Each structure stands twice: as structure tokens, then as C-alpha cells.
Image (cartoon, grey):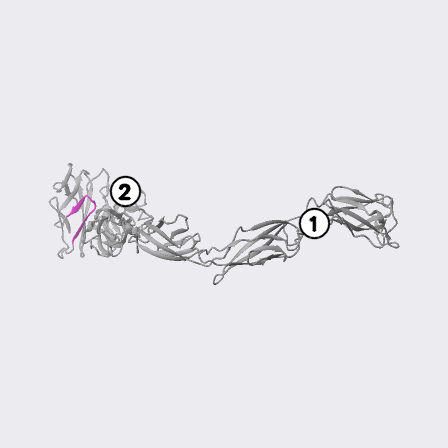
Amino acid sequence: MLSIMGALQVTFSDCKGNDKLRYEVSSPYFKVNNDGSLVALRNITAVGKTLFVHARTPHAEDMAELVIVGGKDIQGSLQDIFKFARTSPVPRQKRSIVVSPILIPENQRQPFPRDVGKVVDSDRPEGSKFRLTGKGVDQEPKGIFRINENTGSVSVTRTLDRETIATYQLFVETTDVNGKTLEGPVPLEVIVIDQNDNRPIFREGPYIGHVMEGSPTGTTVMRMTAFDADDPATDNALLRYNIRQQTPDKPSPNMFYIDPEKGDIVTVVSPALLDRETLENPKYELIIEAQDMAGLDVGLTGTATATIMIDDKNDHSPKFTKKEFQATVEEGAVGVIVNLTVEDKDDPTTGAWRAAYTIINGNPGQSFEIHTNPQTNEGMLSVVKPLDYEISAFHTLLIKVENEDPLVPDVSYGPSSTATVHITVLDVNEGPVFYPDPMMVTKRENISVGSVLLTVNATDPDSLQHQTIRYSVYKDPAGWLNINPINGTVDTRAVLDRESPFVHNSVYTALFLAIDSGNPPATGTGTLLITLEDVNDNAPFIYPTVAEVCDDAKNLSVVILGASDKDLHPNTDPFKFEIHKQAVPDKVWKISKINNTHALVSLFQNLNKANYHLPIMVTDSGKPPMTNITDLRVQVCSCKNSKVDCNAAGDLHSSVTSVLLLSLFSLACL
């Protein structure tokens, strides 16, 4: 039985010793101490406010209703501010139905239904009944509450969950025997009293924080926030944070601290201990615990893992593993010749570790380049322009290494950030080199066999070996050339012909070899370009050589002839077209010039159906000129009814003698 002693002492007895007695107050601004004293936690100004005190042990529970009746702001003791009103409700307004808020602890156990409050109607007519409506009665979720229609006792039928529904707004009215409302409805508020039945939950993981190595003590790393579904106005949801475990626990088992109220994780060790390069592991895992009930032992807990990464800063400069490196390379070769190794204690995944190399001395001809191997961080020194042993057999380079990221202000690059590379060039038997290459000469075609064209010249780059050179023909497509193997003199062994298919754009190309006396011998290749000047050594020719004409044609034109010449200007057109007079009767054929390259053959009169041979003489413009006589075959055909019949109607009518003169050349010498 719960009762009030005087004005500020609450007593409760379960008749079994009150073992594990707990008090709960409906307002967060009050609490009941273990001795039963009721204390206000803040100023009280709400006169007329109703409070409910719930007492519970494993064997019994009860509830008392308290009403504030004082008029002054009071904090601390509750003397003279509470009046016990267990059986007599305090009038709130002038009405017959009197209701007070009902407080029901969540998670109540069987048996159900159980009475939780009572409605009083002092003026209720005889035979009238109470009726209860609202969400939780006749609205979903239905059937949670019901009222004794005769006595006004309100009961609950099942366990309530504050986190599902925290308050229920019900309505009470009185009705006559026919169900007609006599008074009301009057609101009845049912408040579900929170119990600590929800653990704190970390809902936003994974939790990963970063802090730079060497950060000052007290640097904030990250914030951990948990959620508790219980009433935030009570200690049931008042959370406190702490670090349960730190892995690894070196160099200190307490590297970090968490603000118990805010959840901020901060560093607590000195910057010197927060050194990524000396830590056993730059990653720490913290087991963070959130406990409700303001961290009291009776509170529920939830945990989460916070991963904290100690980020690297560039506080270590790269250093070469050796002060001097050696490399050898054959002259004429290119590619990587040596890998330069460095050490850097910084994080290999960052620009504080990645190396950047620079050649600062010994590379005036830009023959060398250096690049960073992204996997190993080594400097790959390469030859990009072939080296010449005869010019320099040794090279010395000075290399420096830096990081992609700048160093922190108190760290600098020292002597170990530079190294010397000694490069030895190995002599290789190089092939002779022709000069110039290509070699060029201009000659007239048809020069006499044995004519000297030029003397080639090849030198041996291996000047220190004093080797001899021999020459030979490598490629001579037309077989026109000879070369003296000792002195390199080139002469002709056949007539050079500009019109040969081996000549392109008047240029003939041949290749020669120069072979030194080394062991093994080395070979060089030289190109000779011979430009051939044209000589009028080709007679022109005509096209076409066959023509047709009707025997009754009104247009006596026979054919348009064209002429061509393999030579070049001025040894080609304009061409002169003539009919060979000695073999052709007069007053039958004639030829007329059209332009420099074409002429028209026509008749003076129609001819009988037959095949005729007309000798055409064409002469070019060369000095001296060349002439060619070609037989033009003219077929005189029958053309009647749109049909052409060119079958010869009789013997061949020839306009030439039995032996035709094919070509008439000028007697002048070429």
C-alpha cells in the first residue's frame, strides 16, 4: 500500500520486505529518493498540476496521485506543496463527470484486465451508464481500454508499449438506457509511463575517424552518437559514453578519451607518442559503450566499434640507400640502365612517401631521363639519346630525390637525399656511315657504258680501332651499276634508260654497303639517287589504229587520232600528223590538225565497202625530231536499215606498197 506521510514522505509496503523497491514519477522534474522523500528538481510554478508516483517490487505495485496546491516557486523540499488525494478527486471545473489523467507503466505483466483508474459522476441519474470512446477503445488499436459502465472503473486489457504509443486521448460520457448522451464527452488522457526497456543503439556506423600524427593533446577525432528509444525526458534515455577497450594498447592503454555526455573522442597522449612511424599499428579500434540511466550501473548498454586511423604527414625525407651507384651501357643503346633505391619511413600510400627524382648535374645533352617506379618507389634511370663511346666513355650524374608532398616545416632534405651515378659506356663495333646520305647525282640517259657517276665516301665511327672499309652493291634493281670495293667509285655497266620501269619520276635508286674490318664486321648502308635527264630516244605513236565509216555517210570524217610520246618536254608535243604521200592516192584522204596532240582523218568522197590501210606519219618536237609511221586500218561498212555490216566486200584495198615503211628516223646523231 502506497501512502503519503505528512507532506513530503512516500511510503510503500508489499508485506514482504520491499525488496528491490523502485519508484517512478510521471514528471521528469521530480524524483523519489531511496528513503521515500519526494524532491523537486527545478522551480515549481504549475499550481494544480497532477503527479503520479508509481511504486513497484517483484511482489506488488501501487500508484498514488498528487496535486500541487502551493503558490510559490519552490525547489528542493516539497513541504506544504502536496496534498494526498488518493480517494477524493480534486475538482477542476464545475461539472458532474470528474476525470483525472491515468498513468500506466508500460510492460505490465499478467493478470489482465486490471483497473487503472476511475471516473466519477456525482450527479449521474439512476440507470445511466458510462461510455468510453477513442483510439484504443473503439478505434484502432481497438480493445486496449474499457470502462465499467456502472461503476466508472477504467481497466487495461494488455501490456502497453510507450515506444509504440506514448499517450491515448480517450473520451468519457454518460448515456441513458437508450444510449443517448446525457453528459460529455469529457477528455480522459492515458499516459504510458516509460520503463527502461530499450538499449542504446549506434545506428550510423561504420565509425571511422582520422587524426594527423603529432596532433596536439585534446585534438577532436570524431563524435559517437547513440540512440535510445525510451522517453527522452527521463533518465531512461539519458546516455553516458565511455571507452571499454582500446586495441592495440600501446604505447599507452589510454590514447583517447571520450566526452561522456557529447560522445566526442579526443586524443589524450602527447604529440610525441602520436608518431605513426613508431606506432606498432597506425590503426586503433575502440569499443565504445553508451549506457542509459545517466551511466548508473542499472542502466542498459549498447556498444559500437570506432576505428581511428593515424594519418601520416611528411615528417621524414627520402634517403638514398647508397651515396654512389654504378651503371654500364653499350654505345648506341637506349633504355633503363640502373634502378636507384631510396628509403622513406612515411606512409607508402601517400605523397609523403612517393619519390620524385631530378637530374641536377651531368646531363647537358639531355641524354638521360629518370622516372619513378610507382610500385617500388625506385628511380629508373634511362638513356634516351644513344651515347657515343668515341665522344665520351664515362658520364657522372648527380641525382636528387624529393617527395610529392612538401615536408613539414621542421624537417628538411639532407645530404642523403642526393646520390651520384657513374656510367661507363662500352665500345661497340659500329657500322660505317655514308656521307652524305642519300648521295645524289644527275646524268643524261643513254650515257656510254663505263661512265663514272661518282665516288662514294663512308667513314668508320670507331676511330680508335683504325679499321679498313670495303664497298659493294646492295640493291641495283636494273643491274646498271658497278662499285670499286676499295675506293668506292661507281660507274655504269649498262645503258641508263629514263623510260625504264625501274625509274620513278626520272630518279633511279640504288643501295650500297660499306663493311668494316672489325670482328665481327659491321655494315653501313648508303643510298644513291640518280636523276636521269631526258634524251629524245622514243618516237611518238598514234591511237587508235582501227576506224569504221559508212559507205554512204554524209559526214566524211573518219576518226580523231591522238599521239603520245614516252619522252619529256620538249621532246614530245606538239606533234605533226601527215599521210605518207608516197603510198596514198591524192584526192581521197586528208588529215587536219586539231591541237598539239590530236588530228582528224577524213575523206574527200565516199568509198566502196572494203578494208583500207592508211599509213599515218607522226613527228615529235625533239631536236633532232623522231618520226613514226603507223598503219591506220579503215573499214568502210554498209549502213542500211540501222544495221552496220563491216564484212569486206572484195579484196583488200591497199594504199601502200607491198612493204610498208614502219619508221623513219632522222639521220642526225643523237
**Amino acid type, residue under disc 1 in the picture:** Lys
Q: Nearer the viewer, residue 430 or 653?
A: 430
Q: Nearer the viewer, mark 1 or mark 2?
A: 1
- Assess whether residue 30 is covered by the magenta stretch: yes
Measured from the top left, where is residue 210 in percent x and y?
Answer: 28, 49
Q: Residue furthest left?
A: 6
Is residue 420 shown left or right of residue 555?
Answer: left
Measured from the top left, where is residue 610 in percent x and y?
Answer: 86, 52
- Assess whether residue 437 is covered by the magenta stretch: no
Label 2 crowd bin: few (<14), some (14–19), many (20+), radius 10 Å = some
Q: How far is mark 1 from mark 2, CA to CA?
A: 123 Å
Is residue 6 shown left or right of residue 641?
Answer: left
Would residue 623 be seen by someone viewing this image from the given angle? yes
Is residue 354 shown left or right of residue 61?
Answer: right
Q: Nearer the viewer, residue 595 or 343?
A: 595
Q: Nearer the viewer, residue 2 or 410?
A: 410
Which of marks 2 and 1 precedes in the sequence? 2
Q: Which mark is residue 566?
A: 1
Measured from the top left, where is residue 237 in percent x and y?
Answer: 24, 49
- At 37% from the left and 49% from the top, the residue drawn is 362
Q: Which mark is residue 257?
A: none
Q: Tell me the element at label 2.
A: strand
Q: Are marks 1 and 2 in contact (CB under 8 Å)?
A: no
**Amino acid type, residue under disc 2 in the picture:** Pro
The residue carrying mark 2 is 187
Q: Tell me the element at label 1.
A: loop
Tell me which segment is drawn in magenta: 21-32
Relative to 476, residue 93 above or below: above
Measured from the top left, where is residue 164 in percent x and y?
Answer: 30, 50
